[in-house]
Image (tube, helix red, strand yellow):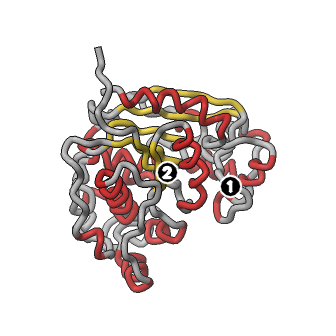
Amino acid sequence: MQELRKDKPFAVILPGFLGSSEDFEDLARDLRRAGYGAAVAPISWWHWIPCVGGRSMRPILERIDFAVNQVLEDLNTTSISPPSYTLQDFLVDFLTNPGGILKVGGTDDPADYPALTPRGDDFASPASPGSGRRVALVAHSAAGWISRVYLSGVNYGGRSFKGSKKVHSLVCLGSPHFVAENLVFKSLQYLEREEGSALPARVRCLCVGAKGAVLSKASDMTRGAYELCGAMPGDDDVDGDGMTPLFSAIALDSADKMVLENVSHAPVYPAFGPSAKLAEERLTKPWYGSPEILKKWFPWLKASTMD
């Protein structure tokens, strides 16, 4: 029989690609109202720019680790102070972060990424987590598969994060897990090549996907997103949340799955970038973190207080 964890239940919320922490504060508030501690990792949309085009996700991985470490120091926190990061730091990361179509650092293969530490003084000396404590991650969109790299022991650009020592559960909200053959998923290809598709045994995972945006009736933006995630051109029966096709959202075999109806991918309206058109759905559809949808997956997260 499982015993209750002695840790206070706490979730670190991770914004998805080009997402910002402020877009997820309502979700953090609703989790706290439900009795589950929560704070959002200090990630802004522009922090993703050095990673665009299939480049190393280590700048985001460092921010995930920074957030987890800060929370483990204080499980009563409701806000995580951002690490120091200047405009000069951003420019250096933009010019030197390896990978991508230009093969910055000489390669587009994560196995060959040079050991290059992203800029930011606070990353160099991470906080020491409390002994034995672990938290949950609630990851939106691309942050779901990026979290798998964080949880693993794979050497990624000179660092092995081994986040499973600090994390007991992962909830993926509309996260693509199908290993598509393109630059964007190079890191996921590398992870599965090195460690397989299963998460570390001590980490539970729930993949939440949605139906309601069938390709045959979708916008060009959704068509492009589904094909990027591995949908074949002309396969108009592919369904999903408008950004991540359902088959990709539930493609992690070792995870529990939950399929929802008519849930939008985007957390906010209005938005810009890849989610701008999709965000209009938020006028008529809930998203994964809306209160009525949170009630559907929160019981699984609450059960993660069992160890």
Q: Judge left or right: residue 141 versus residue 158.
A: right
Q: Judge left or right: residue 64 versus residue 141.
A: left
Residue for point 68% across, 55% down: 268
Secondary structure under tag 1 reads loop
Tell me if residue 237 comes above or below residue 89 in the rendering: above
Tell me if residue 280 comes above or below residue 157 in the rendering: above
Q: Give the labeled residue for mark 1.
A: 268
Residue for point 68% across, 65% down: 272
Nearer to the camera, 247 or 90: 90
Packing grade of label 2 (10 A; few <14, some 14-19, many >=20) is many
Residue 179 badge: none
Tell me if residue 111 comes above or below residue 177 in the rendering: below
Packing grade of label 1 (10 A; few <14, some 14-19, many >=20) is many
Seen as rendered, the residue at the extreme top is 1
Which image quadrant is residue 102 in? bottom left
Q: Give the labeled residue for mark 2.
A: 142
